[in-house]
Amino acid sequence: MTASRPAPDRLEDRVASFARLLGEIHEEELRLLRAAGRSLTEYYVLRILAHDPGATATQLARRLSLAKSSVSVVIDDLVNEGLVQRTQNRGDRRRITLRLSRKGRNWVTRFLALKGSLLWEAMSGLTAEQQQMVEHVMARVTAALERRRAGTGGPS
């Protein structure tokens, strides 16, 4: 089932409004990070390691689209603060994997709770059904944009 297309200017206005909302949420997220004494890159490294323990600096750099040297500086800081641990691979001693320490896991958990409160506040005026609808629509739009970026097209 394909929805009828709204007028281009109306769609553009909706997208612009949504982009402004996302920008405001992102600015609030940055404010929370600054208050916690973290940079956005540090946060992304911690989040990736929370979901992918055992990643390497090279893998992090690739996922963040940053130079490995830049990511290494961030990793060094996080290791020195006790948030990340380095482990030498037993099979290949040149391979160093990274994982969150207990302190790092606790930090990520606390920050995600703060961020969740922010997102909850943004959606608190919606019913549970409307929140599910927003989540579903965002997933569909994201998937369509990812297909377009990958050049696979897909349903329109």
Image (spheres, rainbow, N blue to C red):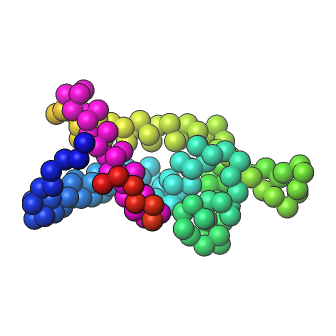
Relative side of 16 to 45, left or right: left
Location of the N terminus by quadrant is: top left
Q: Which residue is drawn at 67% across and 44% down?
A: 53
Q: Foreground residue, 1 or 69? A: 1
Relative side of 117 to 49, left or right: left
Relative side of 71 to 107, left or right: right
Q: Foreground residue, 80 or 136? A: 136
Quadrant location of residue 70?
A: bottom right
Instruction: Find residue 146 and report its horizontal and vertical position in percent.
Output: 42, 57
Query: Is residue 17 shown to the viewer in this render?
Result: no
Give the dominant element type of the magenta stretch: helix, strand or loop: helix
Q: Which residue is drawn at 24% across and 58% down?
A: 19
Query: Is residue 42 shown to the viewer in this render?
Result: yes
Q: Is residue 51 magenta?
A: no
Instruction: Find residue 54 and report its horizontal and vertical position in percent.
Output: 71, 48
Q: Residue at x 45, y 65 (%)?
A: 151
| Number of numbered discs overlaid on the protein picture | 0
Say if 79 sits above or below 129 in the image: below
Residue located farthest toward the top when viewing the structure as drawn = 128
Say if 99 sits above or below 10 in the image: above
Instruction: Find residue 147 and report its horizontal and vertical position in percent.
Output: 42, 58
Q: What stretch is highlighted in magenta?
A: 127-150
Q: Residue at x 15, y 59 (%)?
A: 11
Q: Foreground residue, 114 or 53? A: 53
Relative side of 106 to 84, left or right: left
Q: Does the magenta stretch include residue 143?
A: yes
Instruction: Find residue 17 and report its horizontal and vertical position in percent.
Output: 16, 57
Location of the C terminus by quadrant is: bottom left
